[in-house]
Image: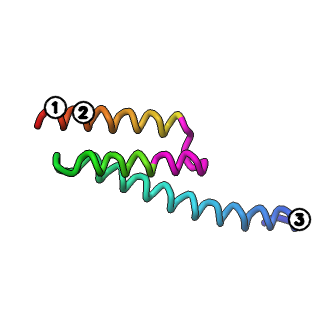
Amino acid sequence: MANTASALKRIRSNNRKRIRNRIVRTRTRTAIRAAREAEPADARAATLAAISALDRAAQKGVIHRNNAARRKSRLMKHLATIEAGE
């Protein structure tokens, strides 16, 4: 256990941030999953929602901006194949 007051405060703040980051990460993963499994008619809207979630996560610092860019690229590539197949 921590000895100093600042270390105790750091533990409390880290726990708050961990919970907040977990919420953002879960919402982002859910949006990505929905975009990958969407029907062709709903694929574009689901992909744009997932991209928005990725941008929000990157802006908050939950994931790195390059990680968000890579995932967005993959989602758009997947969307292009779906739209080409219609």
* Tag 2: amino acid: Ala
| Depth order, front residue of 29/9 | 29
* Residue 22 place in picture, x, y as percent: 52, 59
Q: Quadrant of residue 65?
A: top right
Residue at left offset 27%, top offset 36%: 78
Report the residue marked by disc 2.
80
Picture coordinates of residue 3 (x, y %)? 87, 65
- Under circle 1, the secondary element is helix
- Magenta part of the chain: 54-65
- Residue at 44%, 58% (x, y): give it: 26
Whether residue 57 sits left or right of residue 48 in the image: it is right
What quarter of the picture does the N terminus occupy? bottom right
The C terminus: image quadrant: top left
Which SS class for mark 3?
Answer: loop
Look at the numbered discs 1 and 2 and tell me whether their residues touch, using CB distance below 8 Å: yes
Placement of 68 over or under 21, stated as above or below? above
N-terminal label among 1 and 3 = 3
Query: What's the CA distance linking mark 1 and mark 3?
Result: 61 Å
Identify the residue under disc 1: 84
Front position among marks 2 and 3: 2
User: What's the residue at 80%, 67% (across, down)?
Assistant: 8
Q: Position of residue 67 (x, y in %)?
A: 50, 37
Cα distance between the residues tagged 1 and 2: 6 Å
Q: Residues within 10 Å of mark 3 (few under 14, many from 20)?
A: few
Whether pointer 2 and pointer 3 mark residues with C-beta atoms closer than 8 Å, the reply is no
Query: Which one is earlier in the sequence, the residue at label 2 or at label 3?
Result: 3
Residue name at image x 56 percent, y 57 percent: 21
Labels in figure, total: 3
Identified by mark 3, the residue type is: Thr
Q: Are marks 1 and 3 in contact (CB under 8 Å)?
A: no
State the predominant SS element of the stretch in magenta.
helix
In this figure, which residue is indicated by the disc labeled 3? Answer: 4
